[in-house]
Image (cartoon, rainbow, N blue to C red):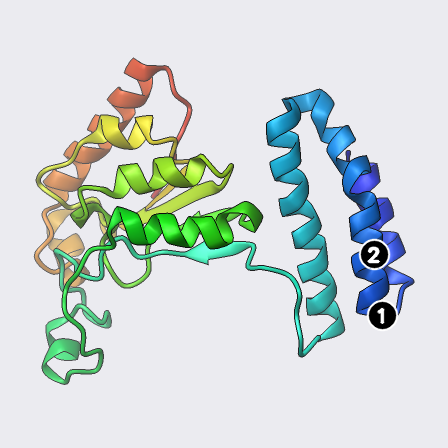
Amino acid sequence: MLHVIHEIERQIFVRSSTREILRLLDDARETVRGSLRDQMGEPAAAALTLKLLNLLLARHHFQARSTTVHSRPYGLLVDPSNGCNLACPGCVQSAGAKSLRIFDWHNGLIDERRFASLLERFGPCTLQIMFCNYGEPLTNSNTPRLIEMAKGYLIRTVLSTNLAVPKFDAEAYIRSGLDFMFLAIDGATQPTYSRYRKNGQLAVVFRNIEALVKAKRRLGSRAPTLRW
């Protein structure tokens, strides 16, 4: 498979016009699809072919510094919640930022219908979704369902969390198919931790990590990868 991609990249490099490159990628569709079909079956091969060809086109636009692009986004950033349970200094959720109204927004949660519309438009070409921005994704109880929806489009899912929520369904996150979870923990003792993670309890975080590890073992899952 890699030699097929490298050959397409080589041919893209020697072409000067976007029209020629679009024709090349269209002609390469069946070759890429055939290479993938033996490894994963027809539906997945067809879906991944579209993602790979879109990525190659996006790379061409980046290297050529194109001012007009024909590729679709290959990565998405989605905030399941724009609120947070903590108030860390320097964050838009801090007391200082809120008093100065630096980011003037109301707390809210993304609903399943809106996310489904986003996936319908961009999901077929997307390779990865990062489920976080300025909010805490675990404050949206529907986040595991959003992850599950993204996995239906063969999208790699990544989430960053402070994991300091008192009510946490570890098994729901394992079953969702989440691939990678960043754990934002700034300290190994409560006094150190609380200097930055305002309103957070380290004991709660450790309890939730333990629940995740136990759920992974119980369900026989290697995912998500946990990174402190």
Which residue in the protein does label 1 denote?
Answer: 17
The total number of labels drawn is: 2
Left or right: 220 with respect to 87? right
Identify the image quadrant of the N terminus. top right
- Foreground mark, 1 or 2, reads 2
Residue 183 visible in the snapshot: no
| Amino acid bearing label 2 | Arg
Contact (CB < 8 A) between labels 1 and 2? no
Answer with the quarter of the image where residue 145 lies: top left
Q: Earlier in the sequence, mark 1 or mark 2?
A: 1
Please identify the quadrant where the C terminus is shown: top left
Residue found 24% across the figure and 26% down from its top: 171
| Residue type, label 1 | Ser
Say whether residue 62 is left or right of residue 125: right
Question: On screen, 66 above or below 187?
Answer: below
Q: Disc 2 marks which residue?
A: 23
Residue at 30 percent of width and 57 percent of height: 79
| Percent position of residue 177, x then y | 39, 31
Q: CA distance from mark 1 to mark 2?
A: 10 Å
At mark 2, the secondary structure is: helix
Q: Quadrant of residue 132?
A: bottom left
In the displayed structure, 117 sits above or below 210; it is below
